[in-house]
Amino acid sequence: MMTKRSRPPRGLFITLEGTEGCGKSTQAKLLGAYLRSQGFVAVETREPGGTPLAENIRSLMLDRTGEPVAPETEAFLVLAARRQHVTQVIEPALARGSIVLCDRFSDSTLAYQGYARGLDLSMLKRLNRLATRTTTPDLTVVFDLPVATGLARRRSAAETNRLDRESLRFHQKVRAGFLDLAKRHPTRIKVVSARTSKETVARAVARVVAPMLGRVRLLADNNKAAPDSPSPRRSQARHALR
């Protein structure tokens, strides 16, 4: 049986995280466009969501109904959607050598259901391992923005969800959670300020991502050399972002 170290080369898994209104969804689209312009195959997706079943779970979790949602219920919904997403979208794309850009992933579970809701972090990590098996981001970009600024953006949008209406204190805990995770995992998690224009932020993201692209370029070149392999420069993307 192959060990984690002896697995064949795969694509690159990049997750984008942050509080509500930080602009990560916009940056995911800009990053996807940039990567395709450089000849990479990029798959853009999101959590909760990314598959029809997972999108239905997303609707259940974010629906603004009057029924209170227990923190454990929220966590179980997210993790169920993640298992489906990893199986149906993320792992197959990585196996093809694609760069997967995911708007939220496991760090959001820790920040929202752990740091903010108060669920045990160790328990959430164990459950997340069950949902993801060995699928872990190669790089996570956290977009940092003052909570009040992000909430003002979100609450002025045409559509808001249940989490948008949580208290300021709740979202402050989420932000603190992301920043603490970045301190604990400095090699994987990079914090980018989201206070400036989207173009300036996009350039900062490109600088963070650039060192990771060498291995994917090598894999793409190897595939290109194979006589029956499709060119990596064909634009292929899956969009599941809001």
Image (tube, grey):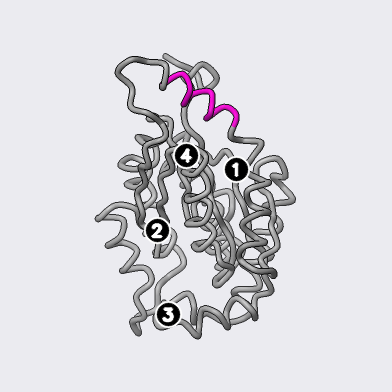
The magenta region covers 214-223
The answer to which quarter of the image holds residue 97 is top left
The answer to whether the residue labelled 4 contacts the one labelled 1, judged by CB atoms less than 8 Å apart, is no
* Residue 27 point in image, percent of width and height: 54, 59
Identify the residue under disc 4.
99
Q: CA distance from mark 4 to mark 1?
A: 11 Å
Q: Nearer the viewer, residue 119 or 34?
A: 34
Label drawn at residue 160: 3
* Residue 6 point in image, percent of width and height: 51, 16
At numbered mark 3, what does the secondary structure look like: helix, strand or loop?
loop
Residue at 31% from the left image edge and 68% from the top image edge: 59
**Magenta-colored segment: predominant secondary structure:** helix
Q: CA distance from mark 2 to mark 4?
A: 19 Å
Label 3 packing within 10 angstroms: few (<14), some (14-19), many (20+)? some
Label drawn at residue 48: 2
At numbered mark 2, what does the secondary structure look like: helix, strand or loop?
loop
Q: Is residue 37 above or below residue 170?
A: above
Residue 224 falls within the magenta-colored stretch = no
Mark 2 or mark 4, earlier in chain: 2
Mark 3 or mark 2, earlier in chain: 2
